[in-house]
Image: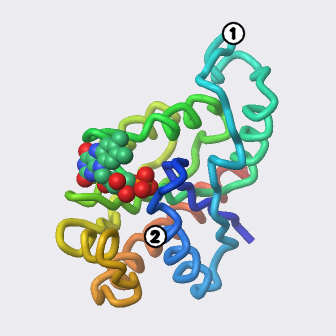
Amino acid sequence: MAKIGILMSTTRDARFADQPAAWLLRFAQARGDFAYEVLDLRDYPMPFFNEAGSAMGAPIEDPAGQRWQQKVAEYDGFIVVTAEYNHGVPAVLKNALDFAYRQWNRKPVAFVGYGSVGAARAIQELRLLASALQMMPIGPAVHLQGGEFMAVWKGGKPLDELPQLPAAATRMLDDLAWWVRALKTARDAA
Ligand SMILES: Cc1cc2nc3c(=O)[nH]c(=O)nc-3n(C[C@H](O)[C@H](O)[C@H](O)COP(=O)(O)O)c2cc1C
């Protein structure tokens, strides 16, 4: 069965990320199509990138970075559950993206964003980064934004009470599934 990593973009102690990641994990697992797992960068405490060269051409020396590469290699696709920090990608996620290369290649990536504009600006950046990593950034995304984000983030409203979330997540996961199958077939045949 193909394996999908649900990658949280933040690691700070007080992060909100766990809530959308846990919701998505439950929702995606109920489909029964792939093996979904949460990938937490707290488990891979990589330093700021200080390697001899890009992961594209040089082996990674940092032990956490090596473990990270091995973990990324296990997956056939990813869903990045992302915040937006100062209208961009949280730095800890960018650092983690840089620590691998071949392990990202030719795999699809979908996005769930939360924040005032549903992390739309960070997700646009991530789409560019994904193309540099030779990934396929898929179109349909889930944006938890505006008053709804505030109601969950500050008001403690459960994500299960947002009526439009399942439809948006289904659109995203259906499209991701198509790309996971197509690219896995092509990678296996290559
Ligand atoms: C360093 C920092 C920068 C932020 N910048 C933005 C921003 O540009 N846009 C936004 O919608 N929210 C911004 N916020 C608020 C976040 O949406 C909110 O804190 C969210 O919980 C961050 O995700 P996290 O809890 O997983 O770290 C920022 C928060 C932090 C800590």
| Residue 29 appears left or right of 123 | right
**Amino acid identity at mark 1:** Ala
Q: Sort mark 1 into few (<14), some (14-19) or many (20+) by Cα contacts within 10 Å.
A: few
The numbered dot on residue 22 is none
Helix, strand or loop under label 2: helix
Helix, strand or loop under label 1: loop
Q: What residue is shown at x 28% (from left), y 84% (from top)? A: 164
Residue 14 drawn above or below residue 29:
above
Residue 172 drawn above or below residue 74:
below
Q: Position of residue 112 (x, y in %)?
A: 40, 62
Pick the quarter of the image with the C terminus: top right
Q: What residue is shown at x 18% (from left), y 66% (from top)? A: 146
Q: What residue is shown at x 36% (from left), y 79% (from top)? A: 156
Please tell me which of labels 1 and 2 falls first in the chain.
2
Q: Nearer the viewer, mark 1 or mark 2?
A: 2
Q: Is residue 78 visible?
A: yes
Q: Sort mark 2 into few (<14), some (14-19) or many (20+) by Cα contacts within 10 Å.
A: many
- State the separation of the CA atoms marked 1 and 2: 36 Å
**Amino acid identity at mark 2:** Pro
121, 154: nearer the viewer:
154
Q: Position of residue 149 (x, y in %)?
A: 27, 69
Residue at disc 1, CB closer than 8 Å to ligand 1: no
Q: Give the residue at mark 1.
A: 52
Residue 166 drawn above or below residue 127:
below
Q: Is residue 82 visible?
A: no
Q: Give the residue at mark 2.
A: 20
Q: Quadrant of residue 89?
A: top left
Residue lying farthest to the top in this orientation: 52
Q: Position of residue 141 (x, y in %)?
A: 34, 64
93, 128: nearer the viewer:
93
178, 3: nearer the viewer:
3
